C-alpha cells in the first residue's frame, strides 16, 4: 500500500529537485503530445530547448531570450512576494496592460519633444499605472474583504477593453491612416526603450529584471518585511501576533507586484512591442505565475525559471516555423509544466511509503 | 460490578515514524464497568481508543468484543458492533443543527422529525437538556458535549468511550456528567474513561489501566489508591510542586477598565466591561470554561485586537490603541494558547521563531534588517535556559513535542524580561515534567518583580501558581479574590455554575 | 434608440445567455460545499467547449457533444482532484494551473475547427404552450438544456436540503476532521463532488460552443468560468441564489449586447466591460457584510485534508 507521511521539516533536496524533475517530466509528456500531433518528439524537444541557444539561428534567438525573460522575471518577482504571503494577485496581466497604456500615454502626450526627462516620466507613469490598478483589489480586500483573486482577474478583462479603447481612441496614431494602434516608439527616440548594447537584447526592462531579483533576494532573506511576508503566508495568526498588519501587508504586496507588472508593461510597449495595439497583451502576466512557482517563489529561482520559460517561447516560435507546430502547443506545454511541478511538490513535504511501518522497538 | 468481560485487548501495538504509540497493550473492560485509561499526554491513550473505534488500524495484537473477535476496519463497523465515542476535540459541525449533527453520527438515522423527538426524549431522560433545532455553533462547550453524548446514547451502545470529557466543564457540570455516567453503568453500559485528572478517576471509576510511553505500567482499583500514588504510577517519578515565594506586591503596573470588545470572528465571545488591576510581583489567575472569552482577552491584551481609549493602561500610559510590537517595546508580553500557528510558525525554524516576538526587545533589528546571528544566539539561549529538547535552532517548530515547544514559547517571552506577562493555557497538552518547569518559571518571574496573568482552564494549576483568582464567564470577568482559602465549590459558582441548567439539578460539588 | 430593444426577446435571450454560467456555477457550488476551492472552472469550461464541439461535429449529434463535454470537464476536474486531494498541492495554485493548461489544451485541440458550424440543437417542442403570447416566447421556446439547467438547480437544492448524501457533503465541507473522525471518506466524497463540478462546467462550456455562439473560437469562454466562481460567492452557497445570480449576470450581458447593437453612443469597449465591473461591484456588496459571508462559507473551504494519525 502506498501512503504519504508528513516530514518533520520540508526537505531541502526535494525543494531544489522538484523543478528539475518537473521540467524533465514535462519534456516527456510534451514529447508524447507532439508525437500525437504527428511530429517527431525528439526533434521537437530539441527545437524548443536546444536550437534557440546553440542552433543555426542562435545568434538571433539568444538576445531574444533576455527580451522575453525580462518582463516574466520582473512580474514574477513581484507576484512571488504576494504568493508567499497568501495574497493571490492573479491579475498581473491587467496591471501590465495598464502600466503600458499609462506609460505610453505619458510619453505620447509630449510627442515629439526630445527632452531627456520623457523616458523617466514614462517609467514613473508605468509603475504608477500598474500600482493603481493593483490597488483596486487591495483596497477592496482590506475595506470589504472582497476576494483579491476574483477582483484582480476581472480587472484583466477590463484592462483588455481599456487597451482596445486606447488603441482605437485616445492613443490612436493620428498619422496611422485610420488603423488602430498608437505611434511607434521607434520613431520617438526620447521615449524609445532601445537596446543598451546593440544586438544583446539588453534593454532597460532586462536591467530592471536583474535589479528586481537582487532587491527581492535582499528583502526576503534579510529584511524584516520579507520575514513578515513569510510568516503571514505560513501562519497568519502568528504573523498578527508578531505585529504584522494584514491590511498593510496586502496593500504593500499587491502594490509592489502591480508596480513591477506596470514597469514590465511600459518597457515592453516602449521597446520590443513598439506601440500600443489591440494585440499588445501577450499573456506575460499569466505565464509569470508559472515562472513564480517554478522558481519556488525565490528570486534566484525565478531568474532561472524566467529564462527557461523564455526559452520555451522562442523555441516554440522556432518549432512553429520549422516543424509547423501550433503555437497553442506551447501554451499547453507551459500549463503542463506547472501541473508537474505542483504534483512533484508533494515530495518536499511528504515521504512516500510503501507497505506497513516497521515497528521500532 | 465485575460481570462478564465486554472488551478484551491483547498485545495491541501501533507504531508511527519515530514513536511507538502503543506497545503490547493489554487490558479488559467488564460489562457495566467504568474503566479508566490513565496516562500523561503522549502516553498513547488517544491512539488506543482510536484503534478501538476503528479509526486506526493496529500493527499487531488482538481485540475481542462481546465474546467475538473484533477488528473494526472503520468507525461504521465499530458503531454497529456497539461502540460509541465522545471525542476530546469535538467531532461536531458548527454550521449544522443539533439534529443534523446527531444524524451524521448514526448508521441509519430515522426521519428528521422522529429523530428530533428522540433527541428530546433521551436528553430529558439523562438530565441533559438540548434543543434539536439549534445551530451547534451557538452552543456552549458543555452543551456541545451533550450533543456528542446523546448522539452516542441514541445508538444504545454497549461500550461508551469518553476522551478527556471534563476539560470543558465547570465543576458543577462535571458532577452532572458523572451522574449520567453512573446511571448508564447501572443500566449495563460499559464506559472507558480517558483522563489525566486523578481526583475524577477516583470519584468515578471501578478499575484503571495506567499507560506510560505506550506501555501498560499497572492496573488498579483507583478508589484504593491516593491521588499521589496514581500520579507517581502515571509519571514514573516523584514530582515536585512548584515553590511559591511570598513577596510583597509592588506598584500597580497594568490596569484594565471597562473593556468591552466585539470580536472579528462571528463565533467569538464578546468581552463585556472587563476590569482588573495588576501589581508588580503579583500572579493573577483567570479561570473559565473554554470559549468564555479567553482568546479574546489575550488578543485585547497582546494588541492583536485594539481597544477603545482609556481601557488599558500600562504604568499610567494609555496603550489600548497600540499594536503588539509597541506593547512589547513597553514591556507587555504574551504567550497565546495555540502553540502551532499562533505563538509559533510551524514550518519556520527556532531561530526564526525566536525573532518572531523577540526582535524588538532583544535589539535584533538594524534599519529594518534582521540580525540573524543575534536571533540564533537568542534561540540558543532559550534552548539551554529552558531545557528545550531539540537538536538545535535550525529545527522546524512543528518537529518539537508539545511540551518542548511550550517551554520554548514561554522561555522566549520570559528571557525578554517582561514587566507584564500574559499566558493562556501555559501547560495545555504538556507532559507533567514540562508543566512543572513552566509553572516554576512563571513563579520565578513574578518573584523578580514582574506581574503575571495566567489564563487557564486547569483549576489545580491556578490554585498552585496564582495569588488571586478571577473567573471569566461569557465574556465577563469576576472581581478577583485571594486564592488562599478559596474552595472548589466557590470557584465553580464563580465560573457560572452549571451553564443553562436548572439550579435544582446542580448537586453538591465536591471532589 | 433604446426603444428598439424588444423586452420579450431580451428576457428570452437572457435565459440562453445565463445557462452556461448557471451550469458552471451550480457545479462549483457543490464542489465548494464539499470544502474544495477549484479555481479552474474557466479551464474546465473551455475544455468542455472544445471536446463537446469536436464530438458534436464528428458525430453529427449535439447530444453526443454534450456527453463528451461533461466527460472532458470531469476529466479536467479529476486531474485537479488527484493533485489537490491525493498529492495535497495548493488548491489556488492548482486551480490556476488548470485554467492555464485548459486554455492551451483547448486551442491545441481546436486546430482546424475554426469557422465550422456545429449541428443545431432544436428548441424543445412543448406543444401549444410555446404559442402563448409573450410567456410562450420567454419561457417555452428554449432548448432542452435551458430547462435541464433549471431542473439541476432544483435537484441540487433538494439534494442539499433533504438527502442524507447532501448532509454528508455539507458536513465534509464544514469540518473534514470531524467528518473523518465519524468515519466518512473525506477524499472520496470530495473527488465525487469535483467530478460533478467538472461535468457541469464542461456542459456549460459546450452550451457556449454548440448553442449560444455556436462556433469554436480560442478563449471563447472569456472569463465566464471566473464569473461563475463569483456567482457562487454572491449566492452565499445557496442553490436558489445561484440561479438568481446567473440570470442577473446573463441579463447584464444581454442588455449590454443589445445596447451595442442599438448603437448607443458609448464606445463598445466600455459597454463590454460592464459584466466584469458589475461582478466586482456585486462581490464588494456581498463580502462587505463580513459576518454573513463568514457564516455561510463552508468552514474548511480551500483547506487540504491529510489524515495524519
Image (spheres, coloured by chain):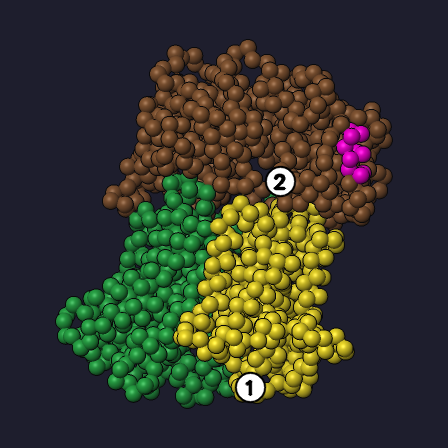
Chain colours: A green, B brown, C yellow
Specify few, some or many for label 1: CA neighbours under 10 Å numbering under 14, 14-19, or 20 or more.
some
Please state which of residues A4 and B451 is positioned toward the viewer in this rendering: B451
- Magenta-highlighted residues: B117-126
**Nearer-the-camera pick, B221 or B338:** B338
Residue B287 lies in magenta, yes or no? no
Q: Chain of mark 2?
A: B
Q: Which residue is mark 1?
A: C113
Q: Element under label 1?
A: loop
* Mark 2, residue position: B137
Image side of residue C9 versus residue B338, left or right? right
Quarter holding the N terminus of chain B? Answer: top right
Query: Does residue C90 show up?
Result: yes
Near-viewer residue (A53 or C54) = C54
Q: Residue at x 63, y 45 (%)?
A: B95
The image quadrant of residue B361 is top left
Q: Is residue C146 above or below residue A177?
A: above
Tag 1 near tag 2, CB within 8 Å? no
Amino acid at each position: 500500500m502506498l501512503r504519504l507521511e508528513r516530514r518533520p521539516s520540508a526537505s531541502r533536496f526535494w525543494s531544489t529537485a522538484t523543478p528539475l524533475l518537473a521540467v524533465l517530466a514535462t519534456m516527456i509528456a510534451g514529447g508524447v503530445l507532439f508525437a500525437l500531433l504527428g511530429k517527431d518528439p525528439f526533434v521537437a524537444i530539441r527545437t524548443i530547448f536546444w536550437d534557440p541557444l546553440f542552433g543555426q539561428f542562435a545568434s538571433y534567438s539568444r538576445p531574444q531570450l533576455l527580451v522575453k525573460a525580462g518582463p516574466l522575471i520582473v512580474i514574477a518577482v513581484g507576484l512571488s512576494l504576494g504568493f508567499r504571503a497568501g495574497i493571490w494577485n492573479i491579475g498581473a496581466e491587467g496591471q501590465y496592460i495598464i502600466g503600458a497604456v499609462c506609460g505610453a500615454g505619458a510619453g505620447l502626450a509630449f510627442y515629439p519633444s526630445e527632452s531627456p526627462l520623457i523616458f523617466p516620466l514614462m517609467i514613473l507613469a508605468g509603475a504608477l499605472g500598474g500600482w493603481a490598478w493593483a490597488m483596486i483589489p487591495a483596497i477592496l480586500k482590506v475595506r470589504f474583504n472582497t476576494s483579491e483573486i476574483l477582483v484582480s482577474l476581472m480587472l484583466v478583462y477590463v484592462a483588455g477593453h481599456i487597451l482596445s479603447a486606447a488603441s482605437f481612441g485616445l492613443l490612436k496614431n493620428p498619422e496611422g491612416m485610420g488603423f488602430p494602434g498608437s505611434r511607434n516608439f521607434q520613431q520617438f527616440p526620447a521615449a524609445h526603450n532601445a537596446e543598451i548594447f546593440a544586438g544583446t537584447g539588453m534593454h532597460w526592462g532586462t536591467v530592471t529584471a536583474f535589479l528586481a531579483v537582487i532587491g527581492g533576494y535582499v528583502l526576503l532573506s534579510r529584511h524584516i518585511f520579507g520575514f513578515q511576508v513569510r510568516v503571514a503566508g505560513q501562519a497568519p495568526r502568528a504573523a498578527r501576533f508578531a505585529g504584522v498588519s494584514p491590511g498593510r501587508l496586502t496593500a504593500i504586496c499587491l502594490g509592489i507586484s502591480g508596480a513591477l507588472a506596470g514597469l514590465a508593461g511600459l518597457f515592453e510597449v516602449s521597446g520590443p512591442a513598439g506601440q500600443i495595439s489591440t494585440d499588445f497583451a501577450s499573456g506575460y502576466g499569466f505565464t509569470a505565475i508559472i515562472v513564480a512557482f517554478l522558481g519556488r517563489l525565490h528570486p534566484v529561482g525565478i531568474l532561472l525559471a524566467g529564462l527557461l520559460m523564455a526559452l520555451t517561447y522562442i523555441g516554440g516560435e522556432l518549432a512553429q516555423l520549422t516543424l509547423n507546430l501550433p503555437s497553442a502547443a506551447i501554451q499547453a506545454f507551459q500549463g503542463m509544466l506547472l501541473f508537474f511541478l505542483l504534483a512533484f511538490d508533494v515530495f518536499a513535504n511528504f515521504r512516500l511509503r510503501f507497505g506497513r511501518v516497521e515497528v521500532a522497538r | 460490578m465485575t460481570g462478564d468481560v465486554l472488551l478484551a485487548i491483547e498485545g495491541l501495538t501501533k507504531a508511527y515514524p519515530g514513536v511507538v504509540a502503543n506497545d503490547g497493550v493489554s487490558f479488559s473492560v467488564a460489562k457495566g464497568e467504568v474503566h479508566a485509561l490513565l496516562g500523561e499526554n503522549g502516553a498513547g491513550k488517544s491512539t488506543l481508543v482510536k484503534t478501538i473505534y476503528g479509526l486506526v488500524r493496529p500493527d499487531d495484537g488482538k481485540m475481542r468484543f462481546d465474546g467475538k473477535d473484533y477488528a473494526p476496519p472503520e468507525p461504521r463497523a465499530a458503531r454497529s458492533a456497539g461502540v460509541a465515542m465522545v471525542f476530546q476535540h469535538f467531532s461536531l459541525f458548527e454550521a449544522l443543527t443539533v439534529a443534523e449533527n446527531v444524524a451524521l453520527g448514526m448508521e441509519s438515522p430515522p426521519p428528521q422529525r422522529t429523530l428530533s423527538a428522540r433527541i428530546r426524549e433521551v436528553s430529558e431522560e439523562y438530565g441533559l437538556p438540548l434543543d434539536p433545532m439549534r445551530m451547534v455553533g451557538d452552543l456552549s462547550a458543555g452543551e456541545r458535549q451533550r450533543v456528542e453524548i446523546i448522539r452516542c446514547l441514541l445508538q444504545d451502545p454497549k461500550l461508551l468511550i469518553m476522551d478527556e470529557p471534563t476539560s470543558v466543564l465547570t465543576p458543577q457540570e462535571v458532577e452532572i456528567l458523572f451522574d449520567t455516567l453512573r446511571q448508564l453503568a447501572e443500566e449495563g453500559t460499559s464506559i472507558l474513561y480517558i483522563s489525566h485528572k486523578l481526583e475524577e478517576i477516583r470519584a468515578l471509576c471501578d478499575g484503571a489501566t495506567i499507560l506510560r510511553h505506550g506501555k501498560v505500567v499497572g492496573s488498579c482499583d483507583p478508589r484504593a489508591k491516593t491521588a499521589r500514588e496514581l500520579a507517581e504510577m502515571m509519571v514514573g517519578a516523584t514530582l515536585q510542586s512548584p515553590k511559591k515565594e511570598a513577596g510583597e506586591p509592588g506598584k500597580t503596573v497594568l490596569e484594565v477598565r471597562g473593556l468591552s470588545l466585539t470580536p472579528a470572528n462571528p463565533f467569538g465571545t464578546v468581552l463585556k466591561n472587563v476590569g482588573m488591576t495588576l501589581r508588580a510581583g503579583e500572579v493573577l489567575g483567570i479561570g473559565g470554561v473554554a470559549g468564555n472569552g479567553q482568546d479574546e482577552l489575550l488578543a485585547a491584551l497582546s494588541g492583536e485586537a485594539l481597544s477603545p481609549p482609556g481601557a488599558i493602561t500600562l504604568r499610567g500610559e494609555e496603550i489600548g490603541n497600540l499594536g503588539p510590537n509597541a506593547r512589547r517595546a513597553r514591556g507587555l508580553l504574551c504567550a497565546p494558547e495555540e502553540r502551532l500557528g499562533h505563538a509559533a510558525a510551524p514550518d519556520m525554524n527556532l531561530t526564526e521563531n525566536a525573532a518572531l516576538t523577540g526582535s524588538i526587545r532583544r535589539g535584533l533589528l538594524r534599519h529594518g534588517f534582521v540580525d540573524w546571528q543575534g536571533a540564533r544566539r537568542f534561540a540558543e539561549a532559550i534552548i539551554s535556559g529552558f531545557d528545550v529538547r531539540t537538536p538545535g535552532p535550525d529545527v522546524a517548530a512543528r518537529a518539537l513535542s508539545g511540551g518542548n515547544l511550550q517551554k520554548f514559547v514561554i522561555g522566549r517571552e520570559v528571557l525578554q524580561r517582561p514587566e507584564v506577562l500574559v499566558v493562556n493555557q501555559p501547560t495545555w497538552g504538556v507532559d507533567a515534567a514540562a508543566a512543572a518547569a513552566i509553572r516554576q518559571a512563571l513563579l520565578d518571574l513574578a518573584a523578580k518583580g514582574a506581574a503575571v496573568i495566567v489564563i487557564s482552564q486547569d483549576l489545580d494549576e491556578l490554585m498552585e501558581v496564582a495569588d488571586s483568582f478571577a473567573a471569566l464567564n461569557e465574556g465577563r470577568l469576576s472581581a478577583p479574590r485571594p486564592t488562599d482559602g478559596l474552595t472548589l465549590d466557590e470557584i465553580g459558582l464563580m465560573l457560572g455554575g452549571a451553564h443553562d441548567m436548572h439550579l435544582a439539578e446542580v448537586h453538591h460539588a465536591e471532589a | 434608440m433604446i426603444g428598439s430593444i424588444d423586452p420579450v426577446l431580451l428576457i428570452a435571450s437572457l435565459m440562453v445567455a445565463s445557462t452556461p454560467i448557471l451550469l458552471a456555477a451550480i457545479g462549483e457550488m457543490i464542489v465548494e460545499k464539499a470544502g474544495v476551492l477549484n479555481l479552474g472552472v474557466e479551464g474546465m469550461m473551455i475544455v468542455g467547449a472544445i471536446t463537446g464541439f469536436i464530438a458534436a461535429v464528428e458525430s453529427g449529434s449535439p447530444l453526443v457533444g454534450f456527453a463528451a463535454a461533461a466527460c472532458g470537464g470531469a476529466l479536467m476536474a479529476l486531474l485537479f482532484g488527484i493533485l489537490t486531494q491525493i498529492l495535497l498541492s495548493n488548491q489556488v495554485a492548482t486551480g490556476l494551473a488548470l485554467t492555464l493548461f485548459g486554455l492551451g489544451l483547448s486551442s491545441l485541440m481546436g486546430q482546424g475547427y475554426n469557422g465550422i458550424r456545429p449541428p443545431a440543437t432544436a428548441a424543445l417542442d412543448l406543444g401549444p404552450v410555446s404559442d402563448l403570447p409573450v410567456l410562450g416566447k420567454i419561457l417555452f421556446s428554449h432548448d432542452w438544456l435551458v430547462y435541464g439547467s433549471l431542473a439541476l438547480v432544483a435537484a441540487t437544492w433538494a439534494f442539499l436540503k433533504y438527502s442524507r448524501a447532501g448532509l454528508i457533503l455539507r458536513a465534509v465541507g464544514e469540518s473534514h476532521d470531524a467528518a473523518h473522525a465519524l468515519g466518512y471518506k473525506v477524499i472520496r466524497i470530495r473527488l465525487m463532488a469535483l467530478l460533478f463540478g467538472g461535468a457541469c462546467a464542461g456542459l456549460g462550456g459546450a452550451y457556449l460552443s454548440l448553442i449560444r455562439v455556436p462556433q469554436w473560437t480560442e478563449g471563447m469562454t472569456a472569463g465566464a468560468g471566473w464569473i461563475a466562481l463569483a456567482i457562487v460567492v454572491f449566492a452565499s452557497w445557496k442553490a436558489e441564489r445561484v440561479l438568481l445570480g446567473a440570470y442577473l449576470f446573463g441579463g447584464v450581458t444581454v442588455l449590454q449586447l443589445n445596447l451595442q447593437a442599438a448603437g448607443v453612443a458609448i464606445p463598445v469597449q466600455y459597454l463590454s466591460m460592464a459584466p466584469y465591473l458589475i461582478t466586482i461591484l456585486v462581490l464588494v456588496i456581498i463580502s462587505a457584510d463580513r459576518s454573513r459571508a463568514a457564516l455561510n462559507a463552508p468552514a474548511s473551504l480551500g483547506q487540504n485534508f491529510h489524515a495524519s494519525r
